[in-house]
Image: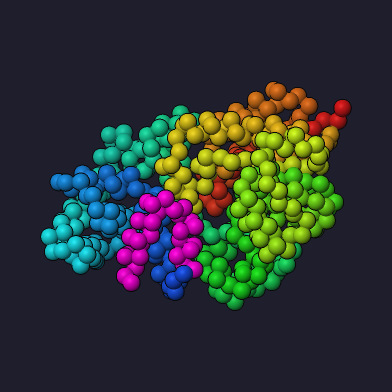
Amino acid sequence: MNVKKRIIKLLGEFEDGKYSNILLNEYFRENNLSRGEKAFITEVFYGVIRNIIFLDYQIDKRATKKVHRRWLRNLLRISYYQAYFMRSDDAGVAWEATELAKQKLGVYVGRFANGIVRSFMREMDQEAENLKSQGKMDILYSCPKWFYEKIEKEYGEETEKLLKSYKKIPYLSVRVNKLKYNEDEFEALLEKMGINIMKQIDSVYYLDSGALIDSKEFKEGKITVQDGSSYLAAKMLGARPGDIVLDTCSAPGSKAVVLAELMENKGEITALDIHQHKIKLLDANAKNLGAKIITGVKLDARKVKEQGKKFDKILVDAPCSGYGVLRKKPEALYNKDMTNVEELAKLQYEILESASKSLKEDGELVYSTCTIFNEENTDNVQRFLQNNPEFEVVELEFPDGVEGHKDILGGLVIDYKEEFLDSFYIIKFRKRIG
């Protein structure tokens, strides 16, 4: 099948409600594709999703009638993306759009596609300048207007840099699972496969190729996909061998496995999730990675204070709006609004408040999110500290090579300036004795 036809099919399934990352991973597992084909499909598929508002604006501006056929609209989106964002050969892009449209929908539609693609190519650079001069930055950077206004309010002059950052193609990051493997063995494997290290944070590596996902080592659980920010949220809890640990919102269990590794598989980790099917996923992941001290429990984390058990360490990696991982999950930008942010902030606070009641005196708790808004981060923490004076903030420092800033409370904000790691908020508390 033609590669662009494959992308059109994938975009159609995405519009039907499937998650982009799950959809693409399943497609690659089920289809025998070359490394080059996978790379092209990945860039264009995610690129169209990241920039869909801009692309649709340009299509609708040039079409005398609205393009209702989803197949045709996705072909045009792909062609516009190639022309403007990839700077692909104009003649080749226009020719292929024409031929594919002609084969699928007839000669007339082929001519229409040719005209509308070439029109955009002639005007695309000026179009971008016009949008900027007209103050339509939300269209230029493909984000809902409310989101742009919110970012502008919180980030001011840094707004455009932030929006540009979240449109970048992410790097693959994997973590060496020290319960089964070590860095020397892993780096030898990279050398053998001709894969380069772009950045390293402890045992998390950012790589210039995704070929490892098909490797024997990945299937055996010696390496696993994980972002450096996610790893740091777990590491900064400071869990030690023999600790009794709670991970409140655990599935699929990547942070719990980090905790098990740091604890040398000695102690106890209770990993919660509200959905039974996610508990099964968590258990399978832990087994594959050799984490033997994790027990998955189906429980709403807001009710954890009612169960009576006390823990040495608690990780509250709370459900959030996900605006810190837009490079990897771009659809998060389109399927939520400010009402969702406020609802999530309320949920996060309830989980944090409940979990804190299960912490032993002198115990430590990490609160983290993969989002960027104050409502879910600093504001929640301020409220928590005001209502719970027995808790104090434990000072954390950024690891070498990680970009970000601290908020007014001392929480770490891994922000848009960090080219590799996801944007994350991490803050640590200690419960005072007495």
Give the colour scheme shown. rainbow
Q: Is residue 342 magenta?
A: no
Left or right of 371? Residue 295 is: right
Q: Quadrant of residue 197?
A: bottom right
Residue situated in front as seen by the camera: 257 or 350: 350
Left or right of 41? Residue 192 is: right
Find residue 289 and report its horizontal and vertical position in percent: 69, 63
Q: Is residue 20 magenta?
A: yes
Left or right of 419? Residue 402 is: right
Quarter that holds the C terminus = top right
Does 190 appear above or below 419? below
Which residue: 27% across, 44% down?
57
Which residue: 75% across, 48% down?
270
Does 61 appear above or below 5? above
Which residue: 63% across, 50% down?
276
Residue ranking furthest to the left? 108
Residue situated in front as seen by the camera: 38 or 407: 38
Q: Quadrant of residue 213?
A: bottom right
Residues in magenta?
A: 1-29
Residue ranking furthest to the bottom? 192
Left or right of 190? Residue 5 is: left
Find residue 140 and report its horizontal and vertical position in percent: 33, 42
Does residue 62 appear in this view?
no
Residue situated in front as seen by the camera: 214 or 408: 214
Q: Quadrant of residue 7?
A: bottom left
Secondary structure mostly seen in magenta is helix
